[in-house]
Image (cartoon, coloured by chain):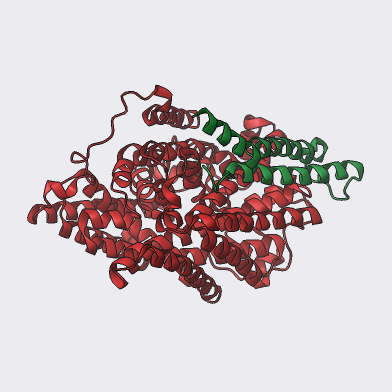
Amino acid sequence: MKAGSSITIWFFIGVSLFVNGALILGAGLYALILAPEHKVVLYNLHADIWWGGLLFLIGAFYSWHFSPWRARARNEARKKKS
Amino acid sequence: MKFSPLLIASTLVHLSLVDFAIIIFYFALVIIIGMYLKERSNTGEDFFMAGREMTAWVAGLAFLSANLGSLELMGWAGNAYKYGILAAHWYWIGAIPAMLFLALVMMPFYYICKTHSVPGYLKLRYGKGAQTLSAISFAAMTVLMSGINMYAMAVVMHVVLGWDLSFSIWISSVTVAAYVMLGGLRSAIFNEVLQFFLIWAGALLIPILGLIEAGGWDGMKAKMVHNLTEMGNANPTAYTHLWSTLGNYSDNPMGIHWTGIVFGLGIAISCGYWTTDFLVVQRVLAAKDLRSAEMAPIIGAGFKMMVPFIVILPGLLAIALLRDPNTGALMHLVPADQAWSAAGQAQGLHGYDEVLPLMLARYCGPGLLGLGITALMAGFMSGMAGNVSAFATVWTYDIYGELINTNATDATKVKMGRWITLVGIIISIGTAYIVMHAQSIMDYVQALFSFFIAPLLGTVLTGMLWKRATRAAGFWGLLIGTLSSVGMYFWVKYDPVAVKYIAFSFAAQDQAQNMFRALWCLVITMIVTVLISLATTPKPDEELKGLVMGLTPLPREMNIPLLKKPIFWASIVIVAFVAVNIIFW
């Protein structure tokens, strides 16, 4: 679904996951270097690093794939074809 | 739920800078989305129906998300702690069959008649009487419920984060008002889909890490039995079985019989909510074509089936794993009024509804905690946006356009839609403050909302499937059905012995009573509608085209590939639904 002329909802979701993933990954890496005083249960699994990284990658893919620029290019290509 | 939040001294979690950054980013993003969509909400169809251009995926995820409020998530995680896996019935038999029924049976009639709302369908089918009755009750109950949810959420934020009640109420209200007034239903739907992703991103880690800590499903079950036995529970194995303990009211923690679950929950309550509550149906009506409108509830059903993984499983894991960090003793969660009283706080008690925040605090450090809290807030705000956007549509089309200004132009309706959104939020805020000072009102309003669900289903269903149902029957069936529900509620309230007649057992708990009451009032509504129909003159067939089964030509799907047919995907969902019920029997 298109939100406006070219931005889809999936782009906003991508941006959200990308930014949140980056912040969580960053916090996880910081905690790895400077271990917190109060550790959560299963801290040794470093969930913030792999979960943040996963969100970051999914967000980056969505942001790129559904970016307004790519959507515009796709629309123009479709117009030329027809 | 009665408690004194102002007495709470300590908070459950403490946020760091990165957590605040995540929360602030969410608020900024939803406002940006609303501002961006403003240009696309100039006509009535745009503002109230999102231009009817949503794909099946967007409509389906919004359909599910409108129901996935944070109170729902926290409430059912708490119920899973209290009742065990029985709580999953509300996600499986209490949702899946109804969602598929909406998709395959009812949606064609809703969609083909191009109604703006469920009361709008009643007008076309039965006339103004039934429309007005359902519109006024829906509009009033929706904003009141929104206010109650607002208050409850503010209390949770106070308990979990130590935030001031008024701060939570105003910050969330102003944000929701801004993006719904700007972008209308399209903006609400966008944010619901965003919320769907945030909820999964924020909550999925809890069951994954919980299962690792518990030693897998079998390890969790063994720990649950051990801990429940330590708590003095007589039947600890009942907490991990869906059906095998439902033969007797006293064999399961919920005090319920399988007939209540199947007929009361699976038919009366579930179908009433998922097929006639305009809050959820509105999302599907915004689909771009009939096939998308049919696919949307099927997609929603597929994801609904997975929600217990992030809601019910944390509740079960809490039974298995939660121990006092200082003493190592088993943690006993208690009802909210007990936990959040001064005495409860002095003893360090936690309420059932705190299961999710407790598990969140257990596994999530800085960053992940912020995402989890953002998911809960996003859930609340989307639920509120759903309420006000549905309220604005019903008010504008079914009350203002029908009773106050019958000549309103499209532009006037859009203007009214924007203003009434603001008014709806102000009434909700007012309700939240009233409840803050008189909490007993909350129980009555919650009960009031339940009064209308089952009778509305009876009226809509009879009208949709039986062409003989008449105008007078629609109105009187709905009215008498609703009054019967009210009557049964107060009968039990003032004479507890009545439980035996309504739910067939003194052992029936609140949930069981609600189910049987809904079932009785559905039956009463349908009987009254049929009897009055037989005594009155029906509408001519010509006037019922597009509204009633048998008189509505449905588009054939002969040349559509199998993978694009709603019935194919509905079959897959049914197979998965049967499978999970057998696996957890």
Q: Residue at (80%, 56%) from the top-left corner? A: B16
Q: Position of residue B521 (x, y in %)?
A: 28, 55
Say if A39 sits above or below B481 in the image: above
In the picture as drawn, the residue positioned furthest to the right comes out as: A34
Q: Position of residue B301 (x, y in %)?
A: 45, 38
In front of the other: B532 or A30: A30
Q: Position of residue B29 (x, y in %)?
A: 65, 54
Q: Position of residue B179 (x, y in %)?
A: 56, 60
| Relative depth, front residue between B172 and B315 | B172
Can the viewer see residue B385 in this picture? Answer: yes
Say whether residue B305 is left or right of residue B224: left
Give the answer, above or below, for where B336 lies relative to B300.
below
Towards the viewer: B219 or B542: B542
Residue name at image x 57 percent, y 51 percent: B191
| Display colour for chain B | red
User: What is the quadrant of residue B2 in the picture?
Assistant: bottom right
Residue B331 visible here: no
Image height of B554 relative to B504, above or below:
above
* Tally of numbered discs: 0
Q: The chain shown in green is which?
A: A
Answer with left or right where residue A64 lies relative to residue B520.
right
For the point 31% across and 42% down, which residue is it?
A: B106
Q: Is residue B549 left or right of residue B415?
A: left
